Image: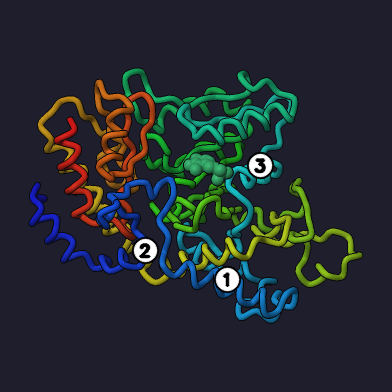
Amino acid sequence: MYKPTLDYAQQLDKEDKIAHLRAQFHIPKDKDGNDWLYFTGNSLGLQPKQTQQYIQQELDDWAKYGVEGHFEARNPWMPYHEFLTNSMANIVGAKPLEVVVMNTLTTNLHLLMVSFYQPTKTKYKIVIESDAFPSDRYAVQSQLKFHGFDTEEGLIEWKPREGEELLRIEDLEKIVDDQGDEIALLLIGGVNYYTGQYLDIKRIAEIGHAKNCMVGIDLAHGAGNISPELHDSGVDFAAWCTYKYLNSGPGSLAGLFVHEKHAHNKELPRFAGWWNHNKETRFNMRKPFDVMPGAEGWQLSNPPILSMAAIRASLDMFEEVGMAALKAKSEKLTGYFEYLINQIDTDRIKIITPSNPKERGCQLSIQVQHADKSLHKKLTENNIITDWREPDVIRCAPVPMYNSFKDVYRMVEILKTLL
Ligand SMILES: *Cc1c(COP(=O)(O)O)cnc(C)c1O
C-alpha cells in the first residue's frame, strides 16, 4: 500500500491530522537553515516552544514572591507536582493515585526496590533482560550486593535464543517455572532500549506473580511511545524518565508508578522524608512520620519546580493530542520507515525490531552488516541524527509528535547512497 516516492511521503504528511505539532517544537538546523533529520527522540526529545514560557512563569513568580510563591505563585509550588499527575497517569494508563513525578529514573528504581525487593536467604534472585540498559543492570547488581548476595549468582538473565535477537515470553516462563522459588523480583524493560521490542507486561506480571515474585517495569522507552496500561497490567511498580519521548529536557525528573494494590500498605519498607509524610501535618514539624497513600508515599524531597514546569509544558501537549492519535500516526510512520528500508536493494540490512506493530513502539533498530561507526559519522555529517550501538546497529526513532513522513523518506534516500 505504501509507495517509495517523495510525492507519496508528502501526500502522507498532508493527510497527517497532527502534522501541525511539528511547528510547536524547536527543530535543530544545519548551517544553511535546513532542519536536521532528528531520530533520537528516544534519547533526548526535542524542546516544545512553549517550554520557555512555562519555565519563565515560575522564574517570574520566584522573582515576585520569593518563598511566598509556594502558595502565591500562579501555579503554587506546594502542590505543583499534583498538576502533572492526571496527564502522566493518562500517558501510562494508570490511576492518579498510582503515579507521581519525582527524582530521576535510576533513583526511583532504587527507592522502589527498597520496598519491593525484599529478599530472603532462599528467595533473593533478580531477573533482568540480558540486554538491559546498563544503569538498570548496575542498579540491581548493587541491590544484590547491598543485601549481601553475589552479583553474578543472584542475577538471572532472560536471553534471546542462539541466533535470535528478540526475547520470547515462553523463555521467561521457563525461567520462572524452574527457578521461581529462588526469584524475588523481575525487573524488565517494557520496551527494550536496544531492539525496540515491546514486551507483553501483563503476561510478565502473571508469570512473576504465579511464583510470588514482585514485578517491576522500566518504561524509559515506553512512556509517551506505547500505551502500557500499567494499572490493568497488574505489575507492582514501574519507573520512567521524561526526557526521552516526553520531551522535558536533559536530566529532567522521572515518573513512578506503584499499583493501587500497594497504595495503602503502610507496612512496606521504604525510605522517608518530609515529602512522603501526610500533607495535612507536614508543616507541623513535630509529628511522627505518617506516610501518604499511593505513589506520593515514595517522595522524599520538595521537587525542583523549574524542571516540573518543563514537564508540564510537554504533558499539556500530550493531553491535547491524546495517546490514541499519537499511536495511530506512530504506527503509520514507523510502518512507512520499515517499508522504505525493506525496499533498499541490499542483503546487508536487517531490522531487528519486531515487524508486528503491537510488539514495538516507534523505534527501529537497524543492523547493517560489515558496518562500523563510520556509517554513523557519515549519517551525522548529512544531518541525520541517529544513535549507534556497537557492533553494527543504528537505532532510529521517528517520533509522531514532530517527525514527518518526508523525514523518514529523506533519511532512507541518504542511507541508500551511503551504503
Ligand atoms: C534512559 C534510560 C535510563 C537512564 O537513567 P537515568 O537515571 O535517567 O540516568 C535508565 N534505564 C533505561 C532503560 C533507560 O532507557
In this rendering, the answer to whether 54 lies above or below 390 is below
- Circle 1 Cα neighbour tier, 10 Å, few/some/many (<14 / 14–19 / ≥20): some
Mark earlier in primary sequence (3, 1) = 1
Q: Residue at x 89, y 60 (%)?
A: 288
Q: Residue at x 25, y 28 (%)?
A: 368
Residue 368 circle label: none
How far apart are the two marked residues, 3 and 1, measured between alpha carbons? 25 Å
Q: Secondary structure at mark 2?
A: strand
- Circle 2 Cα neighbour tier, 10 Å, few/some/many (<14 / 14–19 / ≥20): some
In this rendering, the answer to whether 157 lies above or below 205 is above
Q: Which residue is mark 1?
A: 83
Q: Residue at x 17, y 65 (%)?
A: 15
Q: Secondary structure at mark 1?
A: helix
How far apart are the two marked residues, 2 and 3, measured between alpha carbons? 33 Å
Q: Position of residue 330 (x, y in %)?
A: 29, 54
How far apart are the two marked residues, 2 and 1, measured between alpha carbons? 22 Å
In this rendering, the answer to whether 251 lies above or below 67 is above
Please report contact status of discs 2 and 1: CB closer than 8 Å, yes or no.
no
Say which amino acid is labelled 2.
Phe
Say which amino acid is labelled 1.
Phe
Q: Position of residue 241 (x, y in %)?
A: 52, 50
Q: Position of residue 69 (x, y in %)?
A: 69, 76
Mark earlier in primary sequence (2, 3) = 2
Q: Which residue is mark 3?
A: 110
Does 138 sit left or right of 382 as displayed? right
Q: Which residue is mark 2?
A: 25
Q: Secondary structure at mark 3?
A: helix
